[in-house]
Image: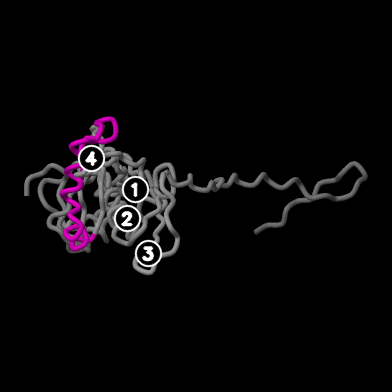
Amino acid sequence: MPPVAAQKGKQGLSTPPPLPSPEPTPCWRPPAPSRATRKISRRSNRSARVTIVTTTNPRLIRCESNLEAKAAYMLLARPDVVDVTEQPEAVAYLDEQDRRRLHTFDFLVTRADGTRIAIAVKPAKTATRRGLLRLLRRIAAQMSPDFADAVLLLTEEQLPGPLVRNAMMIHGARRGRCEKHDAQVAALVRTLNGRVKVGTLVEVLGLGGEGYRAILRALGDGLLSLVGRRSVEYDSWLMPAGAVA
């Protein structure tokens, strides 16, 4: 690098020219707090405590178990879901003895079409032992439509490992979103006619690992669909969303 020429100051002394202004750096802001209406116990001998930071309008989502966290990742990764709130306001209902009870759902989800779904997450054996499905049907029959339009029970049977891993990878890829790369994938998807392997798309994009991450985001954004219930690997088949296999 060539030396910087000196300048003469008012006193005749040689002084260096002023340094250029530094480039502005992005300002980090902490995520917004959790929306949970019920305080989650931080200690448990039977389940984990997991905190997720959303990628759009960063906010904390606090989960009371690994199963709840898996459900949260799956919900956040869906292109038809626009909002996920954990531990929403409790719902009042009358039990079989006409006694007033309160039930707090694990999640309240808002879909792109505006419908809201109240979701309970429990291990299948626990749900069966407690008669949870019967209870949820009772609550749904009494629930105000102002709170939710439907009730859903999720167990590990609806949260298979490969799809949970995909959802977690989509979440991670969204944290480093690159609009330029996403636009390249979107343009490439418009040229597709039928199935294509992930590895082929990565090769055509020429972006290496960043191309793979952009493909994950395209899956989460609903531009692409995965063929089969499996992990997103380089030999996995993809299709444009809405295409017929």
> How far is mark 1 from mark 4, CA to CA?
58 Å
Label 4: element kind: loop
Query: Is there any visible trace of residue 25 in the rendered image?
Result: yes
Residue 236 in the image: above or below residue 28: below
Residue 146 in the image: above or below residue 139: above
Q: Position of residue 222 (x, y in %)?
A: 23, 44
Instruction: Choose the circle earlier in sequence order: 2 or 1.
Output: 1
> How far is mark 3 from mark 4, CA to CA?
35 Å
Amino acid bearing label 3:
Ala
> How far is mark 2 from mark 3, CA to CA?
28 Å
Instruction: Choose the circle earlier in sequence order: 1 or 4.
Output: 4
How packed mark 2 is, by other alpha carbons closer than 10 Å (few <14, some 14-19, many 20 or more), is many
Name the disc covering residue 213, or none. 2
Q: Which residue is mark 1?
A: 181
Please tell me whether residue 177 belongs to the stretch shown in magenta: no
Please tell me whether residue 137 belongs to the stretch shown in magenta: yes
Q: Tell me the quadrant of the picture where the N terminus can be found.
A: bottom right
Q: Position of residue 95 (x, y in %)?
A: 22, 43
Mark 2 and mark 1 residues within 8 Å of each other at the beta carbon: yes
- Residue drawn 34% across and 53% down? 171
Lateral position of residue 75 relative to residue 131, left or right: right
Q: Position of residue 143 (x, y in %)?
A: 24, 35
Mark 3 and mark 4 residues within 8 Å of each other at the beta carbon: no
Q: Which residues are magenta?
A: 123-152
Q: How did the renderer colour the structure? A: one colour
Q: Which residue is mark 3?
A: 48
Label 1: element kind: helix
Q: Which residue is mark 4?
A: 98
Depth-wise, is mark 3 or mark 4 nearer the camera?
4
